[in-house]
Amino acid sequence: MKKQHSATVTGCFVIFVFFFVFHTNLSILSEFRTSTSTRSSTHTDKKSLEMKSTSKWDPLLHPPPLQPSQSPGGQISCDRSHHNYDMCSINGPTVLDPKTSTFYLADPATSTPPLLVEKIRPYPRKWESFVMKRIKEITISSGPGPGPQSPKCEVQHNAPALVFSVAGYNGNFWHEFNDGFIPLFITVNSIFPDQDVIFVIDKARDWWVSKYAGLLKAFSKLPFVNLGNDNATHCFTSATLGLISHGFMTIDPTLLPNSATFTHFRALLDKAYGHGRNRPSMFYSSVTRPRLVLMSRKGSIGRVISNVDEVKRVAEEVGFDVIVFKPSVKTPLQEAYALINTSHVIVGVHGAALTHSLFLRPGSVLVQVVPLGLEWVADVCFAKSAKEMGVEYMEYKINAKESSLVEKYDENEMVIKDPVAFKGNNWSSDIMDIYLKEQNIKLDLLRFKEHLKQVYHKAKGIYGQGGIIF
């Protein structure tokens, strides 16, 4: 078999590796707080919003995390104690030299010897070494630059900087939220809850900037600095490097000063793309039947519904107004948001495109079609976030006869009969490819129709019998 890495596959399946290899239910919940003076180099227990796993830990496989470091004067501090991410901060004026990707203290004369130099890759997948190699290393120095003084400031900002990279799984919609915008939401609400901040972003390519410009503006009205395309030195009142992650598609309100939840994150998306629902759109109209969006995947990437036209017809027979949606990297988010936000149901096979379920309104229905071997990962990647947003979550677990794998394997083989036992602890790319890239789905229309009737009942029950006006 071909050994290929799938961005969505790796993001979800890395959880399984830790679950089965180390027999642990690891949940690292953390908070990173700033101070107007200096930051403590140590962290308190749960009372300070830090709760670490008490499950078994193998020091040979997992060396103990590096302890927080801090410059003698307290201007620079780094916390490397978290499983998902590192965080560094410069607690005072700082100057960025983008040519060397280095932050210097704006006035190194205030620094107390010895010189402190820290390096950080600001991306919240610290455990995944092959991905972290793609992330540019940022340097922080308590001393001057090559000369006796720090680089001369060419652009002065009267605001703090928040530095992060989007180079990891750039282009994968699920990862852009799981590793990007959700950790960004957590970090902003943890450290900058009541102020605008200047984002310093590495690897923000033109297409990425164009696609997410509206969402970036919803976070902060201040323009961001593109680290890869800027040669001017920039000065900030302070700087934070890194993003806080609470886990896969997770926002833990108990770890946030303002107790923000996924509902608040959903409100931020509405701020970016809803525009008070005053923008004219083909989707904002009176409808008499619940609208169902049927997510369609490309034929070469696996987990494709091979009889999608028949599925559309069956859904229409049940009573839905059906729109087949084929999102791509180039799909404008305003267009996608307008469609999903005005629909009652999303139906789709487990995959990155289901991240569009973040655009569903509370009370809507998400139906995830779960292929063989993906039951638990489907729950981790999409079910939890849907429930936390108030979305009605339903699953349709396919049987063996609905999987294309039966064309290659006998139904009595473990790969079909018991995928969990077949996979065991061996999460090679070959095994992952079987379930995520080689498997397509041909839905049993009679069986799926009965499931859609339950979905229709929920949709009509929520929105009433007389239709809904958007």
Image (spheres, grey):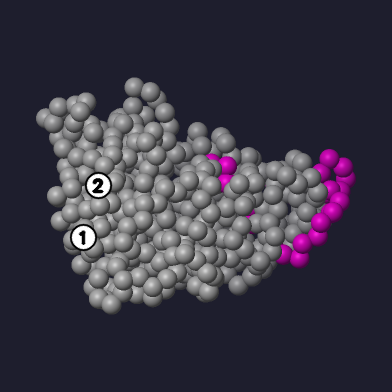
**Real-space Cα distance between discs 1 and 2?**
13 Å
Q: Residues within 10 Å of mark 2 (few under 14, many from 20)?
A: some
Is residue 182 shown in magenta?
no
Q: Nearer the viewer, residue 394 or 309?
A: 309
One can see residue 208 in this view: yes
Secondary structure under tag 1 reads helix
Specify whether 337 is left or right of 319.
right
Farthest top residue in view: 1
Quadrant occupied by the N terminus: top left
Residue tagged 1: 318
Residue 308: quadrant of the picture: top left
Q: Nearer the viewer, residue 243 or 25?
A: 243
Quadrant occupied by the C terminus: bottom left
- Image x and y of residue 17, in percent: 34, 38
Identify which residue is drawn at 81% across, 60% down.
156
Identify which residue is drawn at 39% across, 25% down.
3
- Image x and y of residue 131, in percent: 51, 37
Residue segment shown in magenta? 140-168
- Badge 1 vs badge 2, beta-carbon distance below 8 Å: no
Residue tagged 2: 310
- Image x and y of residue 424, in percent: 24, 33
Give the prevailing secondary structure in the magenta stretch.
Answer: loop
Identify which residue is drawn at 52% across, 69% down.
280
Specify whether 355 is left or right of 466.
right
Identify which residue is drawn at 19% across, 40% down.
402
Q: Residues within 10 Å of mark 1 (few under 14, many from 20)?
A: some
